[in-house]
Image (cartoon, rainbow, N blue to C red):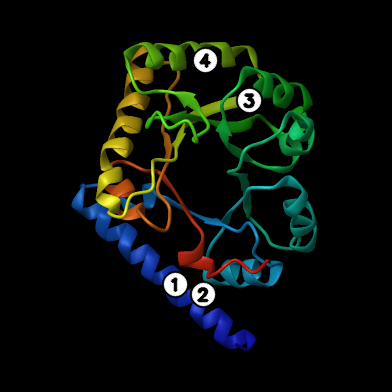
Amino acid sequence: MNQSEVLQTMQERYDQVKARVEAAASRSRRDPNDVLILAVSKLQSPEKIRAAYHAGIRAFGESYVEEALPKLETLSDLEKVSWEMVGHVQSRKAKRTANTFSRLHSLATLKLANLLNRHRDPALGALEVLIQVNVSGEDSKQGLPATNAQEWEDVFAFTHALKACPNLRLSGLMCMPPLFDDPEHNRPYFKMTRELRDFLNSRDPELKLKELSMGTSYDFDIAVEEGATIVRLGSILLGERQY
């Protein structure tokens, strides 16, 4: 496709996604403006990201620090863009993560929290973080276990520990439910994540947690119906990954 066709295709995809978000929000009597469409741009070229920007997308999610850094440099002319880390972060990459991204979706250890807090440049303001929770109990899933009452208490204790990290700002939770043939089967996991957020806020009203990062290209309609404030969309917006 030539550049004009790429831009047209990107605009059509974004408009279709926005329409689905609006429909899902309407079904649950929510304001669609409360749902951020985060374009997961890992393994996508800067040219594709630039086309998405011109279509109206302003938030992009990366999974690998090494891949993201040259992209951010190439696209440094784009204004009012939010770059977010949605992937697992190794301790040795904490410094670069802390000072490159505006939000981290996958916080799950105090070790990483302390490293991010230590390395974050205060001039950038606090790094927004989401706690990744494992609400399915799958061994293959990362995140704090959160399948029963005791584990919910452990998650609450984790939120309390984060108060010792002034360069981090906890704003919510992220989950990755199992993969089912029918995305409707993910509804209980999205609901559980929302209920966990509400439980944490009830235990400590000062937390004021709002964000729920949940839902992908496969199941975001249901995630929005169950309260998602951020949907992480890759192929449905940007097409197949390019490398």
The alpha-carbon separation of the residues under discs 2 and 3 comes to 34 Å
Above-or-below relation of 217 to 171: below
The alpha-carbon separation of the residues under discs 3 and 4 comes to 13 Å
**Dot 1: within a 10 Å radius of its alpha carbon, few (fewer than 14), some, or many (20 or more) residues?**
some
Of pointers 2 and 3, the one earlier in the residue sequence: 2
Q: Circle 1 sits in a helix, a strand or a loop, which is it?
A: helix
* Residue 205 in view, yes or no: no
Identify the residue position indicated by label 3 in the image. 168
Of pointers 4 and 2, the one earlier in the residue sequence: 2
Of pointers 1 and 4, the one earlier in the residue sequence: 1
Q: Position of residue 60 (x, y in %)?
A: 59, 54
Q: Circle 3 sits in a helix, a strand or a loop, which is it?
A: strand
Q: Assess whether mark 2 and mark 4 are in contact (beta carbons under 8 angstroms).
A: no
Identify the residue position indicated by label 2 in the image. 10
**Dot 3: within a 10 Å radius of its alpha carbon, few (fewer than 14), some, or many (20 or more) residues?**
many
Q: Residue placed at 37% from the left, 52% from the top?
A: 33
The amino acid at mark 4 is Phe
Left or right: 144 as drawn, with respect to 222? right
- The answer to which image quadrant residue 14 occupies is bottom left
Quadrant into which the N terminus falls: bottom right
Q: Circle 2 sits in a helix, a strand or a loop, which is it?
A: helix
Identify the residue position indicated by label 1 in the image. 13
The alpha-carbon separation of the residues under discs 1 and 3 comes to 34 Å
Q: Circle 4 sits in a helix, a strand or a loop, which is it?
A: helix
Left or right: 237 as drawn, with respect to 77? left
The amino acid at mark 2 is Met
State how many labels appear. Answer: 4
Q: Position of residue 59 (x, y in %)?
A: 56, 54
Left or right: 165 as drawn, with respect to 186? right
Of pointers 3 and 4, the one earlier in the residue sequence: 4
Q: Assess whether mark 1 and mark 2 are in contact (beta carbons under 8 angstroms).
A: yes
